[in-house]
Amino acid sequence: MLFSVRRESAVPIFKQVCGQVARLVDDGTLPPGSRLPATRALAARLGVNRSTVYRAYQELWALGYLESRPGSYSTVRARVRTAAVSRLPGRDGPRWDQLCPPRSRRIHEEYATLLRLIPRAVPVRAISFAGLSADRELNPDVDLRAAVRSVLLDTGKKLLEYGDPQGYGPLREVIARRMRTHGVSVSAEDILVTSGSQQALDLAVRLLAQPGDTIAVESPTYSMALPLLRFQGLHMAEIPMREDGADLDALEKRLQKSVPAFFYTIPNFQNPTGISTSQAHRERLLAICEERGIPLVEDGFEEEMKYFGKAVLPIKSMDARGLVIYLGTFSKVVFPGLRVGWIAAERDCLQRLLALSRFSQLSGNQLTQAAVACFCADGLYEQHLRRVHRAYRARMSAMLRALEEHLPSRKVTWTRPSGGYTLWVRLEADASAEVSLLKCLEHHGTAVAPGSLFFPGKPRGLCFRLSVSNLTQDEIHEGCRRLGKALSKFLGV
Ligand code: PMP
């Protein structure tokens, strides 16, 4: 058994010894039961410290190559035959596409499609209307830092243990209070804190539907809901969006065919269209669902972002029968990275959602939940909300003026939102021209969120979403000028 060490090598000597023994075991030169030299003898032979050899043997033991008993020689262990550690994973690694069931293969494809459509690398000088995350410059970082410090000092030890699976109590109080300001009469007991409203949606979907079910969705709708729904093996009944919200006549007609597991709706500043529904529309939608016993999943992701005119109350505020599962979030107002969202639902339903949540995450992050509760309790949330409203009111006004000024007056229409971040542009052109449209926009130094992302099925017409969330008023103006030029060229008007 020949060992050698190279002192000039960058590989530590104990690793060299370890590697040589492992190779001899792997290729069968040292079969199970072979005795290794005593550490003292091998150290003397190699001219190294005994502790170096000892460390190499320790490592081999940890890797499962050796057996060693106190006061006895180390011997090679009989291993159950698995691929040798040194040969994994390589070209012959596991075929995960075969190990995963068809449903999981689909999620991989969905993700690849998503990455293909989202312009990740926008050219440096391009002005992008594509992203929807709120402007990080507006985030009150200093106040959050103070809140984290304060909760750590006050209740630190407790916050670092597993917490209440329903969510940190004082935060649920804060959320319930805010919901009451929107006319929803709930208490902390009716709230389940989630990791953003995305997780809230996932829980609601898992509770209400099983593979093969049909659910009704607005079309277009929130792009990140679609892969989640498809992943669960759900079919989607598309209810077209009109200027005043989902087409309820179309919904009623669809319901004559079959009853969906639930209806997913975004009544305020719908993503992607920016449309908010009227009180009358909300009443009729709830009545339709109540009549047939269809749960309504109300995504209130931008409930607090009304900055033009008077707010219309959430559908949940009229929910006498308890059929509405309301999803809320802090993400569109402050600190999306903290991942704090919630569900407000009738208690029996909430307990079922709580069970699902507990099985998947035991309990949520208590520290961030406590920090958000502290931030809100100090009145900083309302102060921040006013600031955000001022900023986005100015940006959306600038956007609407710039679109009037620069977009062609023919073959283009767009929505006029009363808050939020997004609006929706429709072109009189075929949806199949999307790729050439995106190229034309890129050529003119601008980018948008392509409409096809938001349709469960085939896109109806050529459309795209614009967002003001991350642009200054000057950028909005210049971006719209470029957009106008590009669209005039593209549409030939
Ligand atoms: N619903 C809608 C309509 C959204 O646009 C988003 C995120 N943009 C979410 C839910 C999820 O947001 P979060 O998980 O950050 O609360």
Image (spheres, grey):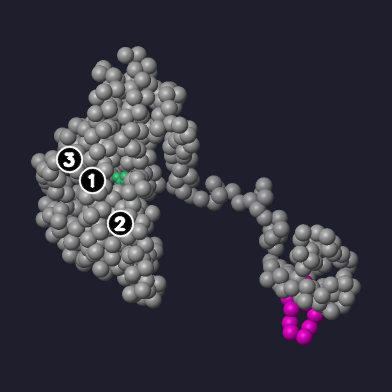
Q: Amino acid at mark 3?
A: Phe
Q: Amino acid at mark 2?
A: Gly
Q: Pointer 2: residues within 10 angstroms few (<14), some, or many (20+)? A: many
Q: Which residues are magenta?
A: 67-76
Q: Position of residue 2 (x, y in %)?
A: 89, 66
Residue 55 painted magenta? no
Residue 73 painted magenta? yes
Q: Is residue 316 left or right of residue 109?
A: left
Mark 2 and ligand 1: say if the CB distance to the nearest ligand atom is below 8 Å.
Answer: yes
Q: CA distance from mark 2 to mark 3?
A: 25 Å
The residue that appears at 30% across and 62% down in the rendered structure is 372
- The C terminus: image quadrant: top left
Viewer-nearest residue: 158 or 454: 158
Q: Amino acid at mark 1?
A: His
Q: Position of residue 242 (x, y in %)?
A: 20, 32
Residue on which disc 1 sits:
389
Which-is-in-front pick, marks 2 and 3?
3
The secondary element bearing badge 2 is classed as: strand
Residue 106, quarter of picture: top left
Name, please, the residue furthest toward the bottom: 71
CB-based contact (under 8 Å), mark 2 and mark 1: no
Viewer-nearest residue: 379 or 8: 379
Which tag, 1 or 3, sits closer to the chain's start? 3
Mark 3 and ligand 1: say if the CB distance to the nearest ligand atom is below 8 Å.
Answer: no
Viewer-nearest residue: 88 or 145: 145
The secondary element bearing badge 3 is classed as: loop
The residue that appears at 24% across and 28% down in the rendered structure is 401
The residue that appears at 73% across and 69% down in the rendered structure is 60
Residue on which disc 3 sits:
308
The secondary element bearing badge 1 is classed as: helix
